[in-house]
């Protein structure tokens, strides 16, 4: 029997077609990515950031009242914590009493100045009177000295006039000394009043300080935001400088994007930015490049690397870039510092 001829197999064209489609798709994808990255700079090393204000006690004392809830929203200036202020009120009363005593001393000093001034005026009048009497005694002495030479008056009468002149001179000198002492007493009284006034100023400073310390027993919110990380309870004794809680400012939410140093060439302030937050993938947030950090993140770390040790391995560093978000207040209120985000800086529209 004759052998049957084998029919030739048709070539399989499916694989080349699939390969061609994949190749074309890859080329189109590559072109798309090339065009995209020619207009954008992206990084996924980004997070939501914001100002977190730690609230620190400025005076010590026992916690009397707490007027906020953990993770609750507070307004700037709102009273959040009240400390027991009885000790500080007593100190204020003591300072006020000391000031009142010092102020009374001012009145006494002014009275002394008035009294010594009156004494000085009286002493000055006595000097004028004594001077007038001395002038008259000198004239009498000169007249009697001429008369005694002529024998018109006796030696006894001349001696009496001379004695009167000596008494007048002594009286005048004594009056001058009293007037000088009165003037010195005025100066002393004025100096004492100056010292007293300084004491009053010091007591006023003590009053102001006591009032300031008393005001610190009322702790208010430094900013509007969410109060978190509360570490106090009613009745707890706190110390000056102790952190009580923190407030995340509502109006300071921004994005910190850590770009590679090789990506900074075309980055500039004011460029538009698209932001995607991992927590809200459907949101499309927008912002602008605001500023650049002064050093890389490694330099700000607790233990910055030292390339002079000899174990140098070149690693691409990252520079923090601050990005301001343009969004409504309600949107910003839902963002929390620490949330992860993806950032795309638009180089060309």
Image: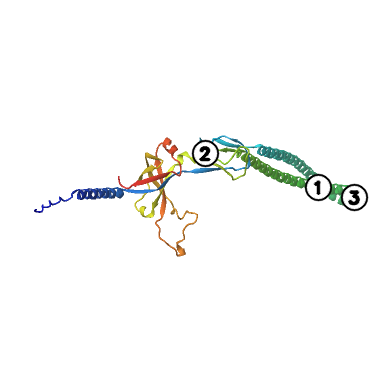
Give the alpha-carbon distance from disc 2 to disc 3, as whole Å.
Answer: 110 Å
Q: Residues within 10 Å of mark 3 (few under 14, many from 20)?
A: some
**Going from the N terminus, do you reach mark 1 or mark 2 first?**
1
Can you identify the residue that label 2 sits on?
A: 227
Q: Position of residue 239 (x, y in %)?
A: 62, 44
Q: Position of residue 172 (x, y in %)?
A: 80, 47
Q: Is residue 223 visible?
A: no
Q: Is residue 300 left or right of residue 242?
A: left
* Element at label 3: helix
Can you identify the residue that label 1 sits on?
A: 174
Q: Residue furthest left?
A: 2
Q: Nearest the camera: 126 or 15?
A: 15
* Element at label 2: strand
* Element at label 1: helix
Q: Residue at x 44, y 38 (%)?
A: 334
Q: Position of residue 221 (x, y in %)?
A: 54, 38
Dots 1, 2 in contact, CB < 8 A: no
Q: Quadrant of residue 273?
A: top left
Give the alpha-carbon distance from disc 1 to disc 2, as whole Å.
Answer: 81 Å
Q: Nearest the camera: 321 or 212?
A: 321
Can you identify the residue that label 3 sits on?
A: 155
**Going from the N terminus, do you reach mark 2 or mark 3 first?**
3
Q: Position of residue 222 (x, y in %)?
A: 53, 40
Give the alpha-carbon distance from disc 3 to disc 1, as whole Å.
Answer: 28 Å
Q: How many marks?
A: 3
């Amino acid at each position: 029997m004759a052998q049957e001829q084998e029919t030739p197999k048709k070539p399989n064209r499916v694989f080349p077609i699939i390969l061609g489609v994949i190749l074309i798709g890859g080329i189109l994808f590559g072109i798309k990515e090339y065009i995209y990255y020619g207009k954008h700079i992206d990084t996924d090393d980004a997070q939501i950031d914001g100002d977190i204000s730690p609230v620190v006690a400025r005076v010590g004392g026992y916690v009397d009242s707490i007027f906020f809830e953990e993770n609750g929203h507070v307004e700037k200036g709102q009273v959040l914590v009240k400390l027991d202020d009885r000790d500080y009120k007593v100190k204020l009363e003591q300072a006020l009493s000391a000031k009142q005593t010092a102020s009374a001393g001012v009145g006494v000093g002014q009275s002394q100045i008035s009294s010594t001034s009156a004494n000085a005026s009286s002493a000055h009048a006595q000097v004028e009177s004594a001077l007038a009497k001395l002038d008259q005694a000198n004239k009498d002495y000169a007249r009697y000295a001429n008369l005694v030479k002529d024998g018109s008056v006796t030696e006894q009468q001349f001696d009496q006039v001379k004695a009167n002149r000596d008494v007048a001179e002594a009286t005048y000198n004594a009056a001058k000394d009293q007037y000088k002492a009165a003037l010195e007493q005025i100066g002393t009284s004025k100096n004492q009043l100056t010292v007293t006034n300084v004491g009053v100023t010091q007591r006023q400073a003590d009053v102001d300080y006591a009032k300031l310390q008393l005001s610190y027993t009322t702790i208010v919110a430094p900013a509007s935001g969410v109060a978190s990380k509360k570490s106090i309870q009613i009745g707890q004794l706190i110390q000056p400088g102790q952190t009580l809680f923190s407030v995340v400012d509502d109006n300071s939410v921004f994005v910190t994007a850590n770009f590679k140093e090789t990506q900074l060439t075309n980055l500039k302030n004011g460029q538009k930015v698209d932001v995607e937050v991992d927590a809200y993938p459907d949101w499309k947030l927008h912002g602008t490049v605001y500023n650049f950090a002064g050093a890389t993140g490694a330099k700000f770390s607790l233990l910055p690397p030292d390339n002079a040790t000899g174990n140098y391995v070149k690693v691409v560093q990252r520079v923090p870039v601050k990005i301001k978000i343009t969004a409504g207040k309600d949107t910003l209120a839902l963002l929390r510092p620490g949330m992860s985000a993806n950032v795309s800086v638009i180089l060309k529209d």
